[in-house]
Image (cartoon, rainbow, N blue to C red):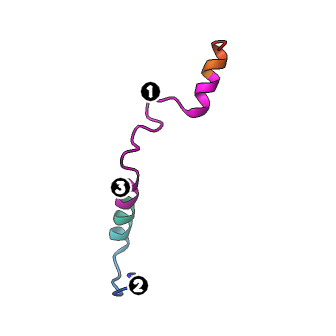
């Protein structure tokens, strides 16, 4: 419900808006934890296993 005008959206419309908002907030961060990317904790584990 909009606190400004009182508009009430259907549940599905509201969920779609929330999903869109979260997706746009993550724009530019798409490479994080993607296949081939090293997790921050895995980098140290990998270096220790190689003796570095």
The answer to which of marks 3 and 2 sits earlier in the sequence is 2
Q: Residue 35 appears at what percent x and percent y?
A: 44, 30
Dot 1 alpha-carbon crowd within 10 angstroms: few under 14, some 14 to 19, many 20 or more: few
Q: Is residue 52 above or below residue 38?
A: above
The magenta stretch is 20-45
Check disc 3 and report its element: helix, strand or loop. Answer: helix
Q: Mark 1 highlights which residue?
A: 36
Q: From the viewer's perspective, is 11 left or right of 40?
A: left
Which of the two residues, 17 or 49, is positioned nearer the viewer here? 49
Q: Mark 3 highlights which residue?
A: 24
Q: Residue 1 appears at what percent x and percent y?
A: 40, 81
The disc at residue 3 is 2
User: Which of the 4 quarters of the picture holds residue 3?
Assistant: bottom left
User: Which of the 4 quarters of the picture holds residue 28?
Assistant: top left
C-beta proximity under 8 Å, tags 2 and 1: no
Q: From the viewer's perspective, is 41 left or right of 23?
A: right
């Amino acid at each position: 419900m909009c606190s400004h005008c009182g508009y009430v959206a259907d549940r599905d419309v509201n969920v779609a808006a929330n999903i869109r908002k979260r997706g746009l907030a993550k724009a530019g961060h798409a490479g994080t934890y993607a296949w081939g990317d090293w997790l921050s904790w895995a980098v140290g584990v990998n270096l220790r296993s190689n003796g570095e």
